[in-house]
Amino acid sequence: MGRSTSLIPEHVAVIMDGNGRWAEQKGRPRWMGHVAGARVVKDVVAHCARAGVEQLSLYAFSSDNWSRPPEEVAALLELFENQFREQADTLVAQGIRLSVIGRRTRLPLTLRRVIADVEARSGAGRAMHLRVALDYSSRAAIQGALPVHHAVAGLTKGTTILPPVDLLVRTGGERRLSDFLLWECAYAELLFLDVLWPDVTSTVLDGAFEEFAQRERRYGRVAARVSA
Ligand code: IPE
Ligand code: IPE
Ligand code: MG
């Protein structure tokens, strides 16, 4: 009823927000929230692949996140490196292709090497395409895609325009996109959840898919009606 698309969104994008507040609420340092968040990422990736999601795009570090305290930035970069290293085998075994999107040149060399390795090893995976956005800015990606900017490419290498997003989920209670996939979300269904990222469970995800299934996507057309 009132549904014009499939039950499971083909391309899911997630703004994984709320790690810092999760830790602060528990009287712990913010980096512990990021560690807890990373554990959830593994479960979410596996759950989405099982559910039949074809593309999953995760916002892990925005270009504006460089403005955070240096200790927090360092903790995040270290965490990314460890996670990619630890998860590479699992991703390959699950048939999940991993790509990192965003600007790569400002990332530490060791992290860049680990990324190149896991991208190469997982490249043939066909079960799901997982994209992790690091040093990502949607405005920079769009700018880099403009013909005039191709001449000075390299700066924005790796920042590409993705297929359209079907469902965008942001946890942590904020209702904004924070420079994530602005172009790709042109007709995305937006879902803002109050749950903090480290508290996300498969039940929360299934709830998001259920909500998506209830939405009627019209793309500017007139609503489909049940004829009387
Ligand atoms: C999201 O959680 C993770 C990153 C931005 C790297 P936050 O760290 O933004 O968590 P809050 O919003 O401060 O709770
Ligand atoms: C967006 O969250 C970036 C990521 C989740 C990686 P932020 O916490 O950085 O966004 P703002 O500052 O609330 O807009
Ligand atoms: Mg935040």
Image (spheres, rainbow, N blue to C red):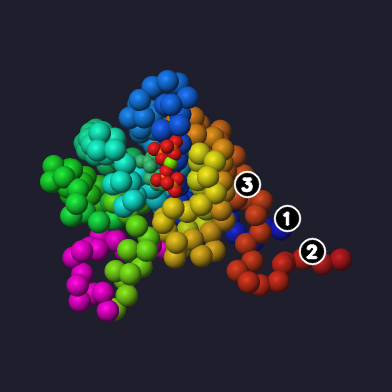
User: For ligand 3, which image quadrant applies?
Assistant: top left
The mark that comes first in sequence, 2 or 1, is 1
* Magenta segment includes 146: no
* Amino acid carrying mark 3 in the image: Glu
Q: Residues within 10 Å of mark 2 (few under 14, many from 20)?
A: few
Residue range of the region highlighted in magenta in the rendering? 148-163
Residue 153 covered by magenta stretch: yes
3 vs 1, front mark? 3
Query: Can you identify the residue that label 2 sits on?
Result: 226
The residue lying at 65 percent from left, 54 percent from top is 215
Q: Quadrant of the C terminus?
A: bottom right
**31 over 12 or under it: above or below:** above
Residue bearing mark 3: 211
Residue 5 drawn above or below residue 110: below
Question: Residue 175: image x %, image y %?
Answer: 54, 49
Q: CA distance from mark 2 to mark 3?
A: 21 Å
Q: Please tell me in which quadrant of the rendered image residue 114 appears.
A: top left
What type is the residue that disc 2 sits on? Answer: Val
Q: Position of residue 217 (x, y in %)?
A: 62, 62
In depth, the one of 209 and 136 nearer the eye is: 136
Circles 2 and 1 in contact, beta carbons < 8 Å:
yes
Instruction: Look at label 1 and name its amino acid.
Output: Met
Q: Gap between marks 3 and 1, in whole Å? A: 13 Å
